[in-house]
Image: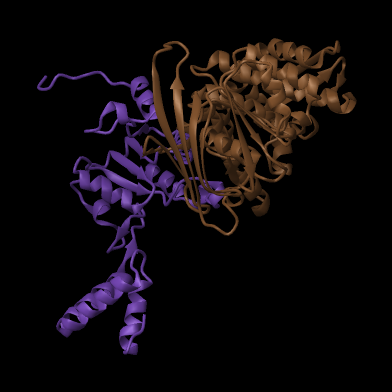
Chain colours: A brown, B purple
Amino acid sequence: MKIQGLKLTQFKNYDSGQFVFSERLNCFVGKNGMGKTNLLDAIYYLCMCKSHRGVNDRNVVKHSTEFFRLEGYFLNEKKIEKKSKSKIKIVAKVQPGKNKEIEKDDVAYQKLSEHIGMIPVVIIVPDDTLMATEGSEERRRFLDNTLSQLDGDYLKNLITYNKILKQRNSALKKFAETRSFNAELVDIYDQQLIGPAQVIFEKRKEFINSFRPVFKEFYQDISSGQEKIDCIYSSSLKYGDFANQLKESREKDRILTRTTCGIHKDDLVFRIETHLLRKFGSQGQLKSYVLSMKLAQYDFLKKNHISNPILLMDDIFDKLDEGRVQQLIKLILEKNFGQVFITDTHENRVEEIIKNFATDYKKFYIENGELKE
Amino acid sequence: MNFTSKLVQESVEAFSSLPGIGKKSALRLVLYLMNQPKETTHDFTAALINMRENIKTCSNCHNISDTEICGVCSDPRRDRSVLCVVENIRDVMAIEDTGQYRGMYHVLGGVISPIEGIGPSDLNINSLESRLEKEETKEVIMAVSPTIEGDTTIFYISKKLKDMAVKVSTIARGVSFGGELEYADELTLGRSIVARIPYQIKGE
């Protein structure tokens, strides 16, 4: 999948803007705070129906305006039938406080989840290191982001699981307030949770198994380091029957008024040699680690999705020195990555590197939310 | 809006306090009533007052009723062997309008949703149980919304009724009549395929 054109209205610091992209490589250059990352976010929004850092739509709308609108013109190139190309228009109309509307070829989706996965996308940002340093939520977000783009069934089960979980927790809170307990109702929530939990667990497990070797390979390519790294899936469902676990932790759940076991507690354990990356990894290792995760995510989506993902890379020089960036760009261009977007603060740095490769590319100079020719 | 008459203003405000009616529609209604004979307004308000003063909830099925026991519950021609469990009174009206059902009803008053502060004890589940104990019901039809909360409710009630000698069924879920397959959403279509039914040749 490729994006050929983008129109923005009142999106972040853009009042209005219009872009025509290269189908291969696009660079947004400009000083800090000019709106380079916002362009990546606009493309991401059209793919995933939300801003990439889970920012509330109220903060996506341009300051002191009421709504924003994004219009993307995509080219659908399926990998199998090379000749079948079709154009798709995606429009996002968002007025915070009201239902957001996403339209495909002028027809609004009934459910946003139907859109997710149609345009696969991977975004690489400096903040990715949070995945290694913050709580498990960030790592589950990574799992969910990858799998829901590939597998509609995964996303459906995840939505169902989260809804039931919310009801179960609300029920537990209500019981605590009223000093009562309805074991029958909790029984039913437990039984309703088991089905989706099992599906999600199996799919996550299977994903990590095929993801690990690719990830390790990327790490070696980027870091040229010899240290052994690994990424291990940890879930309470590995250790026996989920139904029993729910039963055993019921008393605990009742006291804490929330559900203490289940796939919403899953985690990925990042290891370097035999240590935890979070505790013993250097800054450089941390950055290389999460970058490899993202590139492997890209590779995984590319292999398993019917169309090539769009790759969005924000400020890669933050992560790597110039030599490594050169290596990375070489990797991207050689490994036949699809359409790529890069942002950089130095006008000519990326260009110098790209010059060495004969490839089609386009440079956009961004200043104060506007494109300067 | 500026009114020269306080009387008009008050009645406009009264109308526009109703859902779905704005100031302009309210004014139109008020002006209409003003130009009609006085009896029209008298009859109109009398009907409303009478409704509000005398409307009751059926003590048996919790449907709205003019009497202690509603028309459905007291009708001897209705089939007492089937009982249809619905969320609210509007569902009763919708099913009655189909003309396909001649059994009894039981209005729950909602579905189990702790997020909205509705637990099983806030619904008419206990009265359903005591009804089933004394009535000659053979089958309970769950006509509850096909949502996660609806499922929870059906599940909960079915478990409560497990030891009673009644059959529990749910209304069919699937592709709508007169609809086209390609426009049905995946979940509905998927369920319809899984829960397919044997075809019966007409007239046999």
Q: Is residue A15 above or below residue A358?
A: below
Query: Quarter-wise, where is residue A284 in the image?
Result: top right
Residue A80 horizontal/vertical position (percent): 45, 10
Q: Nearer the viewer, residue A311 or A107?
A: A311
Q: Position of residue A290 (x, y in %)?
A: 75, 25
- The quarter of the rendered structure image containing the C terminus of chain B is top left
Residue A139: x and y in percent read: 71, 29
Q: Is residue A58 above or below residue B85?
A: below
Q: Residue furthest left?
A: B203
Side (left or right) of B49 relative to A138:
left
Q: Which residue does the image show at 32% across and 52% down from the upper left?
A: B90
Residue under the image location 34 percent in, 37 percent down? B141
Q: Which residue is painted at 69% across and 44% down in the image?
A: A257
In this rendering, the answer to whether A204 lies above or below B50 is above
Q: Is residue A317 left or right of residue A50?
A: right
Q: State the quadrant of the N terminus of chain B.
A: bottom left
Q: Is residue A240 visible?
A: no
